[in-house]
Amino acid sequence: MEFVSPAGEQRYAALVRAAAESVIGLDMDGTLSPIVEDPTQARIHPDARDVLVDLSRQVRTIAIITGRPARQALALGALDEIGDAMGEAGKELHVFGQYGNERWSSTNRRIVSPRPPAGLGSFLRELPALLRHAGAEDAYVEEKGLAVAVHTRRLDDSRAAALRLEGPLGDLAARNGLGVEPGRNVIEIRSPATHKGDAVRTIASETEAGGFLFAGDDLGDVEAFTAVGDLAGDGLATLTVCSSSDEQGALRHLADVVVPGPDGVLDLLRHLTDDARA
Ligand SMILES: [Mg+2]
């Protein structure tokens, strides 16, 4: 792993000391699951189960914080099985779906979610005309219940299409009281009220955390990094981890540690487990 600064190395050491009272917050796609062409096939890394179960014994709790619907994250991550194994170790796995709009935990196995934001219906009705107008009628529109994701990955000029769509989608979203979240070849439209930073603050306060590690790879993780920075200001031991890729470099500058993709994230978590046990 590559510490961005000597301060990052010191933060890691402090987190190791505070491990028993720390929360491990993890994004899913690009962090625990390799990015693949078809987002419905983005399965969790085969080593993730063993790594997370081992780690759970050394920390207070683990929270998966993802933009995906909780139900989909549970299926693609086999998270209920991981939660079972963690339960045997006396620990709980939390899942925050749709940026924290939905919650699931391995001890309360029901997905709790609020109603869809009010403007989503009219946004969806106007969306096809907008896509046609932008020459992006073949974009894949994923209705996520509480949000809509417009995927440009399968278009010929994926990046150009995403850039072309960002402005008009932002305008249409704003007219309907919604916000946009640009990601890797995807633009997500959702309630502007919730982001991963809220999930970070919620789980930190619920568990009275004394430490917090968050790992992510994309723009949707920026608010989580910011929230972790606030926790550091409150005196918690914290570490921000960027799972890096060629496609998305934005998070690198904000992170204490940069690791190469999901393999690197799992390696770091293995190290943390060993160091916390020692
Ligand atoms: Mg991600």
Image (cartoon, rainbow, N blue to C red):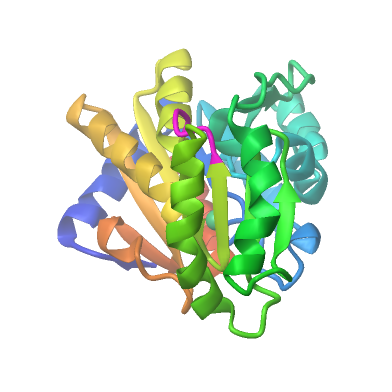
The residue at the point 65 percent across, 73 percent down is 153
Residue 196 seen in this snapshot: yes
Q: Quadrant of residue 96?
A: top right
Q: Quadrant of the C terminus?
A: top left
Q: Nearer the viewer, residue 48 or 128?
A: 128
User: Is 191 included in the stretch rendered in magenta?
Assistant: yes
Query: Residue 163: image x %, image y %?
Result: 46, 71
What is the tally of numbered marks visible in this picture? 0
Q: Quadrant of residue 37?
A: bottom right
Q: Quadrant of ligand 1?
A: bottom right
User: Is 14 included in the stretch rendered in magenta?
Assistant: no
108 over 246 or under it: above or below: above
Q: Nearer the viewer, residue 274 or 129?
A: 129
Q: Nearer the viewer, residue 62 or 86?
A: 62
Q: 159 left or right of 208? A: right
Query: In the orientation shown, which residue stands out farthest toward the bottom?
Result: 156
Q: Quadrant of the N terminus?
A: bottom left
The residue at the point 27 percent across, 56 percent down is 254
The residue at the point 57 percent across, 34 percent down is 63
Start and end of the magenta stretch? 190-194
Query: Residue 194: image x %, image y %?
Result: 47, 30
The residue at the point 52 percent across, 69 percent down is 162
Query: Residue 261: image x %, image y %?
Result: 53, 68
